[in-house]
Amino acid sequence: MMCTRIASAAYPGARAFVTPQSIRRLATATAPPVASAAHNHKVVVVGGGSAGLAIVHQLLRTGRFSQDDLAVVDPAEWHHYQPGWTLVGGGLKKKEDLRQPLKSLIDPKLKFYNDGVRAFSPEDNLVTLSNGDKLGYEQLVVAPGISINYANIKGLPEALADPDSLVSSIYGYETCDKVFNTVQKLQKGTAIFTQPAGVVKCAGAPQKAMWLALDHWKRAGRYLPSDPSSPIKIAFATGLPTMFGVPKYSAKLEELRQERGVEGLFQHDLVAVVDGNKAVFAHGADKQQVTREFDLLHAVPKMGPHAFVKDSPLANEAGFVDVDDGTTQSRKYANVWSAGDASSLPTSKTAAAITAQAPVLVRNLLRTMDGQALEPESIYDGYTSCPLVTEYGKVLLAEFKYGGVPQETFNRWFGIDQVEPRRAFYHLKKDFLPWVYQNYMVKGTWAGPKGWKR
Ligand code: UQ1
């Protein structure tokens, strides 16, 4: 679960720079080219998403790399600004405006392999592409994100694909615009918004979709909070025991839920959609089956590591790239690194988290490449953020680190308590962040709360 993935204790810093003896020390700047590789690169970055692009362009900007020294591997045609899909769900943005051809975002000095990964062979410093080609590397960054597994909820793929159903999800490009269509269509009945047990990216997004829909219906006079005669009724069905994994923000969101008359179905994990209008949940520890009828369903699919990561020697038991919580270095291979959703870093999976992870990873990777020990201060503290839209025009800006400890940028500088939903944070989310992401973060010049970097 997202909330339990947040480390319960503060990061034990000492572990970060005491490298286990068992770790491989072979791959440094002096590593010989790999004879069996079709192509050799100094650094191979798997993934052209938020983490991959930020990292590879930060590496390039050091000026240490020549043409094709750095390679990016990704089979995608498009790069999406996924944090914007919540806003598409609220009718605030067009999904077409949130994507760019991936190729157009990759600096011409980089080698781009527009292909998937079949296998990692870290003992041989090799990555095998889907087309069979082998890439040799000195350093490897694994940042391919996570996989969305729609089929793990029975009947969900069919319900999402049916253009006439009121079943949608902000979690996919195909369906994020269906969300607002279904919200506009619903005149009366029960709307259910779900959040699965287990790992999801952006643990706040499932309820953002709900808060925007609620506000839309309220403004249209179809939702009357806590009034039994309300034409529309709303339930939030979550696999988790609370509204959010961090107590400070969870308390506020629970207060909003109660104030706004939203039914809370906690520890309800959606397992099936049947007959077009029934949601089946596994409830509690004994997974007791609970069925609820709906008129509108916003479903959040199950997510998990990609098979090519999970089935590789790089993975931990849960299937994520097994890296040190502080250094982002693989616990098994000293020349392997990971950040973003694919990594084992025990924090909430967001683009904001990557703004803090990427500079640490880059610094530590370069030190390792130079055969130098890691610096004790180059440690990721678990920083992540969730700009939680609570209504049109208001955002609660959750920012926290490992242990669910709040670390609020605007509290630090201006003494503003970010638990209070505010208009300024709404504009940060809707206008500033998409702009800074596209113009700076993917180019390697944005470090989140630490601002712009060279
Ligand atoms: C951020 O930098 C970022 O990436 C561009 C996000 O992802 C969209 C965020 O959600 C947040 C909160 C940040 C952090 C930036 C500031 C100014 C706190």
Image (cartoon, rainbow, N blue to C red):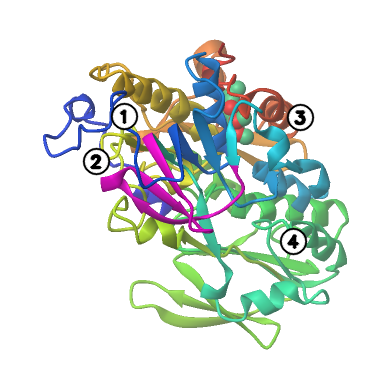
Q: Nearer the viewer, residue 92 or 375?
A: 375
> Crowdedness of circle 1 by 10 Å Cα count: few (<14), some, many (20+)?
many
Marks 1/3: CA distance?
32 Å
Instruction: Kindly give the residue lying farthest to the bottom in the view shown.
Output: 275
Residue for badge 2: 331
Which of disc 4 and disc 2 is earlier in sequence?
Answer: 4
Which of disc 4 and disc 1 is earlier in sequence?
Answer: 4
Secondary element type, mark 3? helix
Q: Does the magenta-highlighted stretch encompass residue 118?
A: yes
Q: Who's the residue at 36% across and 43% down the image?
A: 346
**Do the numbered discs 2 and 1 sit on residues whose CB atoms are within 8 Å?**
no
Between disc 1 and disc 3, the foreground one is: 1
Task: Name the image quarter holding residue 264.
Answer: bottom right
**Do the numbered discs 1 and 3 sit on residues whose CB atoms are within 8 Å?**
no
Query: In this picture, which residue range is highlighted in magenta?
Result: 113-138
Rendered view: 390 above or below 68: below
Secondary element type, mark 2? loop
Residue for badge 1: 327
> Crowdedness of circle 4 by 10 Å Cα count: few (<14), some, many (20+)?
few
Q: Does the magenta-highlighted stretch encompass residue 432?
A: no
Q: Is mark 1 within 8 Å of ligand 1?
A: no
Q: Provide residue 389's location: percent of width, then percent of height.
A: 67, 41
Residue for badge 3: 431
Q: Provide residue 114's location: percent of width, then percent of height.
A: 62, 48
